[in-house]
Image (cartoon, rainbow, N blue to C red):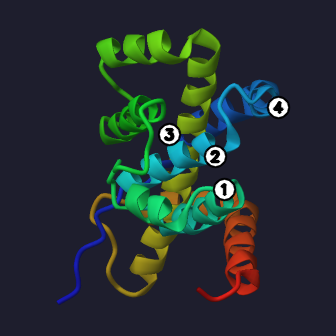
Amino acid sequence: MNQAFDKRVYTTGRFLLDAAYIISRAPRIIEAYYSKRVPWALAEKIMLAVTAVNDCKHCARFHGALAQLSGVEAEEIKGLLQMEIGAQVNDNERPVLQFAQEYAQTEGKPTQANLQELKRFYGEAATRDILLYIRMINVGNLIGNTFDSLLERLKGRPATYSRLFDELVIVITSSPFLVFINGFAAWHAFRRPPT
């Protein structure tokens, strides 16, 4: 028996709002990456923690590859994608990864107490960077899931909460993004030596 598609997806309105937010923050995103207030490996772990909640297979492959390139061990990547913040995660990373999961699980509505704790632990500037990374990966996850929802519709198994119009708008608009992340993940898998 086929399981129903039950991942979070975009509506056109929500997608346009989120895309406008990310585009308007482009200089701030570039500055966050170059500042290294959040090290590359930790940024990738944040991406994986959110991706695990939203269950986007495209982002899992892409950010799994980037995490490997940033020095994250394969076992830790696997654990994060299974929503396990295990022994490999050090005490300095645990709070942000738990916060990232909470952010995704609550659809962007973490408790104020947890947000304040994040600011206390990492500081205002790093917390702003963390929130940008979380928002960015959430957008990527929902784009990937919306693409998968369209594929399920084409197989005759449409998600009851998703509309064809929304799926088409998001997939057509995001197709360069989808081609890039899937192409990079395939290239990385091809060039990686067998284990």
State the residue position of label 3. 14
Q: Position of residue 136 (x, y in %)?
A: 60, 40
User: Which is more N-terminal, label 3 or label 4?
Assistant: 3
* Nearer to us: label 2 or label 4: 2
C-alpha separation, residue under disc 2 versus residue under disc 3: 29 Å
State the residue position of label 4. 34
Rendered image quadrant of residue 191 = bottom right
Residue density around tag 3, few if under 14, some if 14–19, many if 20 or more, within 10 Å:
few
Q: Position of residue 19 (x, y in %)?
A: 64, 39
Task: Give the numbered dot on residue 120.
Answer: none
Question: Are circles 2 and 3 on residues that touch, CB within 8 Å?
Answer: no
C-alpha separation, residue under disc 1 versus residue under disc 4: 18 Å
* Nearer to us: label 3 or label 1: 1
Question: Are circles 1 and 4 on residues that touch, CB within 8 Å?
Answer: no
* Nearer to us: label 4 or label 3: 4
Q: Secondary structure at mark 2?
A: helix
Q: Residue furthest left?
A: 1
Question: Are circles 2 and 4 on residues that touch, CB within 8 Å?
Answer: no
Question: Are circles 4 and 3 on residues that touch, CB within 8 Å?
Answer: no
Question: Are circles 2 and 1 on residues that touch, CB within 8 Å?
Answer: yes
Q: Secondary structure at mark 3?
A: helix
